[in-house]
Amino acid sequence: MVGRRRNSEAWCFRDLFRAFFGSSNRRALELYRNTSIMNQLKSSLVELITETSTNLPPDVREAMSFAIEQETPGTQSAQALGIIATNIDMAQQDEGPICQDTGMPTFLVHTPVGVNQIHVKQAIREAVAEATRHGKLRPNSVDSLTGKNSGDNLGAETPVIHFEQWEEDDIEVKLILKGGGCENKNIQYSLPCELEHLGRADRNLEGVRKCILHAVWQAQGQGCAPGAVGVCIGSDRAHGYDLAKNQLFRTLDDENPVPELAKLEAEIMEEANRIGVGSMGFGGKVSLIGCKVAAANRLPASFFVSVAYDCWAFRRLGVRLDAETGAITRWLYRDPKREVARIARAEGFPLTGREVVLKAPLSEDAVRALRVGDVVLISGEVFTGRDNVHAYLMKNPPPVDMQGSVLYHCGPVMLKQGEEWTVKAAGPTTSSREEPYQATVIEKYGVRAVIGKGGMGAKTSTALKKSGAVYLNAIGGAAQFYARTVDKVLGVHLMEFGIPEAMWHLRVNNFAAIVTMDAHGNSLHAQVERETGEKLRELQHAG
Ligand code: SF4
C-alpha cells in the first residue's frame, strides 16, 4: 500500500469486501489494492516523465519567446533560436524528447506521513525503465567502473531521488531532466578567489555577483546557451550543489522573497545579458533566461558559491498524486487544459539562399573553400562518434572508411522496430570532450568535417588547417529538428558501447550547421570568448 488510509470511502470498501468474502481474504484484498495502486502510480509517473522530456513548461517557453524577440534578426544567434523554437514545437507535437540527452532524472518527492517511500521509489524506478523502453528517455546510465550502459536508466544511485515528508495529504513529485553538457558547466567557487577578467571576489554579495557572472561566461556555448542558473550562497561543498540545483525547481518568473537576493537576481539578469555570449555561444544579446539564488548557513571558515547551470532545454515539471490511488490530481508548473502555443515564428530553418550545399563524402577543395560564418546544408552519409568511439579510434582502425567523412558528435535516441532502427532524437553533444583525440582522428583517417556543439580547442584547429577540414556547429538540443534530417539508418558499428556511444551510420538530407572553425585557423568560439571576456572586464566594478 502506498498511501495511508485517510478517507472513509476506503474503509467502507474494505468493510464491504469483508462482509462478502470474510476476513480470510484480507491479504488478497491488500494485494489487489497494492498492485492496483502501484500500477496507477507507475503510470502517473510515466506520464510525468514523458511530459517533462517532451514539453517545456510555460515559464521556460515564455522566457524563450522573449529571447527570440530580443535577438537581432539574421544573426547566427537568431538562426540558432529559430531552430530551437522549431525543435520545441516538434517535440511537443510528436511527443519526442526535446533533446537527445535526457539527462540525469532527478526527482524531488514529498510524501504524507505514513506513505511507504520504498513503494514510491520502486514505482519511480519502474516508470524510468518504462519511459526508456518507449524512447522518452535515452539510456543514459553508465557503470562508472566498467563503462557499461545499463540500458534502462537504472543503476547505482540512478535515478536520483530525494524524499521529504510533509503535512499535506497528497504526494508531490517534481522532476528535472538536466543533461551532461550543462551539468559539466556547473561550477563552485570558494571565496575569496581571483576570477579571470573580474579580479578578486570577496566574501560579500559583490563577490557572489562576480562569481555568477563568471559562471555564465565560462559556459559559453558548451552548456547550450541561453541558459539559467540556480545558485547557492554558503552551505558546504556537497549540499551547496544540491541547493543550487533545487533553485531550478523555482519558476523563472517568480520573485525571490529575500529582498537582497531578489535585487541580485535582477542585476544578474541584466548584466549577464550584456556579456554577449548569445545562443550556442555564437555571440548575441541573450545569454541567460533565469537566475535563482538561495542563501544557506555556512561554516565560518568556508564561503562557497555553487552554481548549477541549466541549458535552454530546461525540462522541469511536477505532479500532485492522490496517496490512496496514485492518480494525478494536479499538474505543477502547467495547466494541461490550456493549449500549448507554438514558439516558432516560421516553419523549419529560415533559408537565405546563401547556404552552402555539401554532399558527403567531402572533397578537400570544397572544405577549404568554407569560411567561419558560412551556413552549410549537408546531404549524404554521416557517422556518429562520441567519447567511446574516439577512444577506440586512438588504438584501433575504424570499422568504416572515413576518408572524406563527416563525423557527428552525437549520441542519438534510437528505437528498433522490427529489424529497422529509427532515430527518435539526434542533436549534437559537447565537442570539447573529444579535444584530446580529435586531431589524431582527423589526420589519421581523413575526416573532412566534424559536427558538434560548443567548439574545440587549439590542437583541433591546427589539425583542421593542416588536413583541410572544418568544424561545424549544429544547434545543441535541437534533437527533433535533426532527427528529421535523417533519411535512413544505414547501419551501426561498435554496438558494444551501448546505443548513445555506438557508431551510427546515417544518411542525412539538408542537415543545417554553421562553420565555426575553418581550415584557415579561424574560430568563432575563440573570437566570442575573447570579446565576451572584454565585456566581462567592463562589468568588474559595476553593480
Ligand atoms: S540542450 Fe544541450 S546542454 Fe541541454 S541537455 Fe541538450 S545537449 Fe545537453
Image (tube, grey):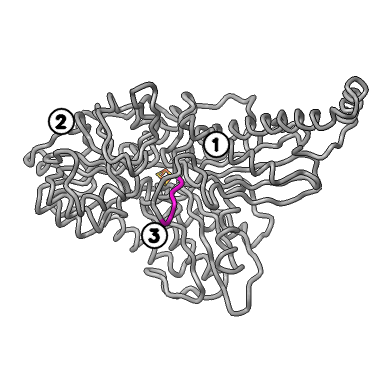
Give whichever of discs 1 and 3 has the lower sequence position: 1
Q: Write down the residue under mark 1.
A: 52
- Mark 1 Cα-neighbour bin, 10 Å: few <14, some 14–19, many ≥20: many
Evaluate if marks 1 and 3 touch, with contact meaning CB atoms under 8 Å apart.
no
Q: Is residue 200 left or right of residue 120?
A: left
The residue type indicated by label 1 comes to Thr
Rounded to the nearest whole Å, what is the CA distance between mark 2 and mark 1?
37 Å
Please state the extent of the stretch shown in magenta in the rendering. 141-145
- Where's residue 349, x and y in %? 32, 29
Residue drawn at the location 63% of the way across and 79% of the way down: 300
Rounded to the nearest whole Å, what is the CA distance between mark 1 and mark 3?
27 Å
Q: Nearer the viewer, residue 110 or 240?
A: 110
Q: Is residue 462 above or below residue 16?
A: below
Give whichever of discs 2 and 1 has the lower sequence position: 1
- Where's residue 164, x and y in %? 71, 51
Residue drawn at the location 51% of the way across and 65% of the way down: 209
Quadrant into which the N terminus falls: top right
Q: Write down the residue under mark 2.
A: 359
Q: Write down the residue under mark 3.
A: 218
Q: Is residue 463 left or right of residue 292?
A: left
